[in-house]
Image (cartoon, rainbow, N blue to C red):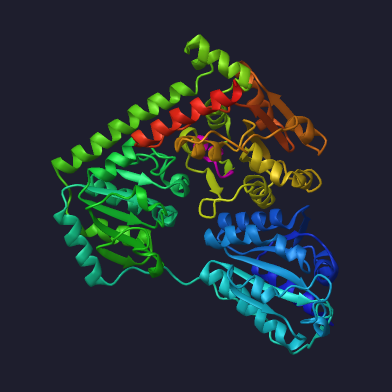
Amino acid sequence: MTTVADLLIDSLADLGVKTVWGVVGDALNPVTDAIRRTDRIEWIGVRHEEAGAFAASAQAQLTGTLGVCMGTVGPGGIHLLNGLYDAKKSHASVLAICGQVPSPEIGTDMFQEVNNDAVYADVAVYSRTITNAEHVPYVIELAVNAALNQRGVSVLSIPGDIGELDVSDDAPKPQFVPPQPRTVPAPDLLEQAVDLIDDADKVTLLVGKGARPGREAVLRLADRLQAPMVVTLKAKEGFEHDNPHQVGQSGLIGNPAAQQAFDDCDLLLMLGTDFPYRDWFPEGKKVIQVDDRGAHIGRRTHVDLGLVGDAGDTAAALADAVAKKGRKAKKHLADARETFEDWEDGQQKLAKAGYDTKRVGLLRKQVDNRGGDIRPELVAATVDRLAADDAIYTSDTGMSTVWLSRFVHLRADQRLIGSSNLGSMANAMPQALGAQALDRRRQIIAFCGDGGLTMLLGDLMTAAPYDLPIKLIVFNNRRLGMVKLEMEQVGMPEYGTHLDNPDLAVVAQSMGFHGVRVEDPKDVEKAVAEVLAHDGPALLDAVTNPDEISLPPKPTVEQGWGFAIAKVKETLVSNP
């Protein structure tokens, strides 16, 4: 006979699921036993369920299919939540299988019981508790279809007495519906967009990850309009390489050229992006937004025309219809590109090993006394130069992402994922585990903050036993760096941001990694090369300067004054 657990696992295997992440235990033991008895799905046991949820979400984002994770009764399921929220906000299709107390005990406040349907109500597009064997084919089908077609999280809760129940031989087999075909806006709306674009002398594109599959059409439209292209962080992987229109990112991690492209345009055309920072949008411009989710249109900035449809297909239709732009547009593009190239030249100087030797002696002494002589820019640029052409990057939220955004130039076959919408710490390492399980021969590089890595440090122990040769680049500045910067720019001295870290290379060695610690800029090249070339999991503990900052595109007088005040306060505290 086929059990509830067998039907669930067989259905997921038929769909193409290759990996399930989680921690074994009680109510879900029948499910893990069903995995044990099949050779079509690999079980990867993590040390913390949050890591499993991040890993499953990474797989869903990289493949466009379903990622699966598990957490058992009460605490186990609750531990999934942060990773599931990241999946929700990243529009990743993830199925979470959660344990529940036995059916007769539900509602009695039994040991470890929580109300799963209430707990997951906000994070999930579909959440149900399986109540009997006849129920299971239908809820499996509904849960998976909801996750795939709404690009979100589905949760199935299985009470302890349900997983081993027999399913009738004539029970229907779950049928899964693939995501629906791409659409384009109605012709009359496209005509309105063409009129608005043709009336504008200077157009700037803001391009997000949703446009990535339509890269060639977007580039054709940009050429037609002679438009500079501001690229969101998540769209770096599709639009940074071989693109004469791109001018980098906006926002706190951005650069002056992106802000210039915004400020100088007459019309902003948003393609496949839900860029969330209102303060960075230009004011007083005509705005057209293209998104395949109508609910996203207009929620970040005022939109004059919203087009619901696939960004790439819509860009192709517009490229065929709009008039070719002339002299003003060409100058708009040339000016933005010149600013961008000048800015990039200045940034690359920061990534040279000998840059700090030119500093004033007093400042140099202060850096030496604080500890950490390596510029994080040097580490990031060195990884960029030595990484494989098809490497997949993951990045922790915070300063690690700043260095990646500015010093890693993604090539055609490289990929990037992070926690760009939820902004969680501790995401890079478990996302790297998920990516590596998809292809153990591909180079996976995680840019980890020391605070983020140590938050889920236990799951370093997941890599070696499951043959996951991830490469972790740790920016060890002994700080919660982004929080430090947030405090200082408003005049607060840093407080509560110091991290008393162990030697992370030694810690990693005790967990099956090849660990390398680097403290001298002259040794960075060799250390990065050694870590990337190692044939198993490897970690670089790069001891970096905690006082290194990144300037936003348009620093304000208030930010500069606040930073000066904070530094005076910090000096007084350290020298009473």
User: In the rendered image, is residue 552 in sight?
Assistant: yes
Given the current orientation, which residue lies at the most extreme top position?
361
Left or right position of 496 against 276: right
Viewer-side residue, 527 vs 576: 576
Residue 95's spot in the image, x, y percent? 65, 67
- At horizontal 45% and vertical 29% (from top left) the residue drawn is 565
Q: In what quadrant of the picture does the C terminus appear? A: top right
Residue 19 in view of the camera: no
Measured as percent of width and height from the top left, residue 28 is found at: 81, 70
In this rendering, the count of numbered labels is 0
Q: Main secondary structure of the magenta part?
A: helix
Query: Does residue 398 show up magenta in the picture?
Result: yes
Percent of width and height locating residue 386: 57, 29
Task: Classify residue 283 as left or right of residue 441.
Answer: left
Name above or below for residue 204 compared with residue 161. above
What's drawn in magenta, residue-wise?
395-404
Picture quadrant where residue 298 is located: bottom left
Query: Dividing the image into 4 quarters, which one contains the N terminus?
Result: bottom right
Residue 195: x and y in percent read 16, 61
- Report whether 512 appears left or right of 385: right
Q: Does residue 255 appear left or right of residue 511 in this picture? A: left
Task: Kindly identify the residue that appears in the image at 54 percent across and 39 percent down.
Answer: 482
Q: State the residue at coordinates (74%, 37%).
A: 536
Q: Vertically, is 290 above or below 535?
A: below
Residue 427's place in the image compared with 524, above or below, is below
Does the magenta run of residues contain 426? no
